Every structure is written in structure tokens, then in C-alpha cells.
Image: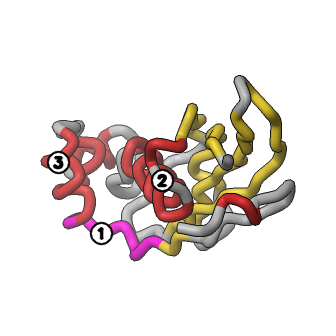
Amino acid sequence: MISTEHIELGTELPTLEIDKITRTTLALFGGASGDHNPMHIDIDVAKSAGLEDVFAHGMLSMAYLGRLLTNWIPQQDIRSYQVRFASITPVLAKPTATGKVVSIDQVDGERRATVELAVILADGTVALTGDAVVAIN
């Protein structure tokens, strides 16, 4: 965690480099999350839908952004967190979670930063975008 007194407009969160998304990653996340959609674990089902292979759960990428935030600031300081799914994350993709402070405001006597978030794949594809509001008193 970093000292919140040094957070200013334009502050970039330390990037979170994620290992390649493997079939094991997808099977374990499916079990942990209860999301057993076969599109994420069964290549035959994915191919029957016109895809080349299975792809990662969108909520897995959302979890990576959550980890990016909580590596940077205590969980109890997160005031809101939302995402938009932009593209699928194929198996064997290598995602990176990023964030940048885009505004700082005073709300209810509390200094808050709005952080723009993204999960970007190694080929430049943006898989997930979002934002969070965090307390930075």
C-alpha cells in the first residue's frame, strides 16, 4: 500500500501483470466462483459457437482489477467500483491491469479519487474498462 497523501491527479497505480490465462486458471476460477458455463472450459462448446477456443470469465478480469485496487489502497477505502466488459479474454492471453487517478474531489468531508481502470491484453486489446472511487484522506 502507498501513502494516500501523495496521491494526485494523474497518479498511476502500479500495474498488475497477470500470468497467462491457462485452462487450469479457468477451471479453478469456475469452481471457486460457481460459474461453470461450458464456454469457459469446454473447447467443443466454444467451437460450436463459432469460437476458436474457450475464453476467460469476465468476472475473472474484474477480480484482477479488484486485486489491483486492493494492492494499492485498503479495501475499506473503496467507495464504488464498476466495470464494462469490452472484449473476451482468450485462453493463453496475458492480461495487465492498470489504473490512473483522473479526478480528486471532496465529498462529505472526505477526499476521494476517481480511478480509471482497464485490463489490457498483450496484443493491445482492451478486455475490460471501469472506474473506482476511493477515499484518500
Q: CA–CA distance between discs 3 and 1?
A: 15 Å
Instruction: Give the residue at x 53% y 43%.
Output: 77
Q: CA distance from mark 2 to mark 1?
A: 29 Å
Magenta highlight: main SS: loop
Which labelled disc corresponds to residue 32?
3
Q: Earlier in the sequence, mark 2 or mark 1?
A: 1
Q: Which residue was labeled with disc 2?
A: 74
Q: Nearer the viewer, mark 2 or mark 1?
A: 2
- Compared with 12, 66 (above or below) is above
Q: Secondary structure at mark 2?
A: loop
Judged by depth in the image, the label closer to the viewer, 3 or 1, is 3
Q: Identify the residue shown where x is 58% and y is 56%.
A: 119
- Nearest to N terminus: mark 2 or mark 3: 3
Q: Position of residue 26 (x, y in %)?
A: 26, 57
The mark lying in front, picked from 2 and 3, is 2
Depth check, front residue: 116 or 5: 5
Q: Is residue 46 visible in the rendered structure shown here?
A: yes
Q: Residues within 10 Å of mark 1 (few under 14, many from 20)?
A: some
Q: Which residues are magenta?
A: 18-24
Residue at the top extreme of this rendering: 108
Residue 19 lies in what quarter of the image?
A: bottom left
Q: Amino acid at mark 3?
A: Ala
Which image quadrant for residue 81? Answer: top right
Q: Quadrant of residue 123?
A: bottom right
How dense is the environment of label 2, judged by Cα within 10 Å: few (below 14), some, or many (20 and up)? few
- 37 left or right, relative to 78: left
Q: CA distance from mark 2 to mark 3?
A: 23 Å
- Looking at the picture, how far across and down is residue 30, in whole percent? 20, 47
Q: Position of residue 135 (x, y in %)?
A: 63, 42
Nearer to us in this view, 36 or 72 = 72
Residue 38 position, x and y percent, is: 21, 41
| Identity, as a three-letter code, of the amino acid under mark 2 | Pro
